[in-house]
Image: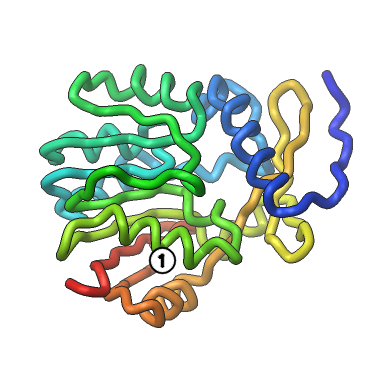
Amino acid sequence: MIGAVPQEPADEAALIAAQRQYYELRAPDHADVSRPSDRKSRGLMGSDLARRLILELDVAGDVLELACGSGAFTRELARSASSLTALDGSPSMLDLNEEVVGDETVEYLCADVFAWEPTRQFDFVFFGFWLSHVPPKRFDSFWSTVRSCLKPCGRVGFVDEDERAKSNEASISNEGTPTARRTLSDGRVFDIVKVFWNHGDLERRLQAKGWDARVRPVGETFLFGTATTPDR
C-alpha cells in the first residue's frame, strides 16, 4: 500500500484538477460497499430516498444532469425525462454510469463542468452531490452556466451533503477553499473541494441572485433544493 502522505496546500486550479483525477481513479470503487471507504464513513444516500426526491421534483421534458457520477440519480431521471443528457468530467465514471443505468436513450457527454458551454437548452437541470465540489469563488459563474442551460421557465433540482456531514471528513482549507482529504483504496491521497452548505445560507445566496429557490435538510446529513430561473 502506498503511504498516505499529506499534500502541500494547492491553489484552486490545482485542487480542481486533483478533484477530477480523484474521481476518475475512484470510479471502480465508487458506491461499492465491498471496497474500503475513502473517508470516515461512506455518506451514501439510500436508493429509496433518492427515488422519492426525484419523484418530488416531477421531472419532465429535456433533462440535463451535471456531474452525473455513478448513475444513482441518472437511473431515476431517465424514468420520466423525454430526453436525458448526462455529463461528467470522468470517462470512467461515465462508463460506470452507462453500465449501471443500462438505458440506450441516455446521451453521455464527457466535459469539464467548469469549462463547458451548452449548445442547447433544457427544461430541467439536475446535479447530485456536485454543488459541494464547486469552489466558493466559482459559485456565481457555475450558476450562470446553469442558467444558460435552461429554457424559459426552466427548473433546477439538486441534492448534496450539508454541514451536518462535516464530521465525516478530514476537512482542511487550501488558501481559503474548503477542502476534504480523500484516500483511494491503494492508499493514494487527494485533496478535493468540499463546501458544506447550511441549507438556509444556500437558499438565501440563490435568492439574492434572483433565483426562486427553496432548500431544506433531508435525512441525517443531506440537503435538497429546487430553483426556477430568475426570468421565469
Closer to the camera in the image, 184 or 83: 83
- Looking at the rendered structure, the secondary structure element under dot 1 is strand
Residue 2: x and y in percent read 84, 22
Residue 227: x and y in percent read 28, 67
Q: Is residue 54 shown left or right of residue 224? A: left
In the image, residue 31 sits, relative to residue 44, either above or below, namely above
Identify residue type, mark 1.
Pro
Residue drawn 24% across the image and 67% down it: 228
Residue 143: x and y in percent read 41, 62
Closer to the camera in the image, 134 or 148: 148
Query: What is the total number of numbered labels drawn onto the structure image?
Result: 1
- Classify mark 1: residues with Cα within 10 Å, few (<14), some (14-19) or many (20+): some
Residue 71: x and y in percent read 37, 31
- Residue bearing the label numbered 1: 217
Closer to the camera in the image, 204 or 171: 204
In the image, residue 210 sits, relative to residue 52, either above or below, namely below
Residue drawn 27% across the image and 75% down it: 212
In the image, residue 210 sits, relative to residue 9, either above or below, namely below
Looking at the rendered image, the quarter that the C terminus falls into is bottom left
Looking at the rendered image, the quarter that the N terminus falls into is top right
Residue drawn 26% across the image and 74% down it: 230
Display coloring:
rainbow
Residue drawn 28% across the image and 58% down it: 156
Q: Is residue 63 shown left or right of residue 172? A: left
Closer to the camera in the image, 215 or 42: 215
Quadrant of res 45: top left
Q: Is residue 3 shown left or right of residue 213? A: right
In the image, residue 101 sits, relative to residue 213, either above or below, namely above
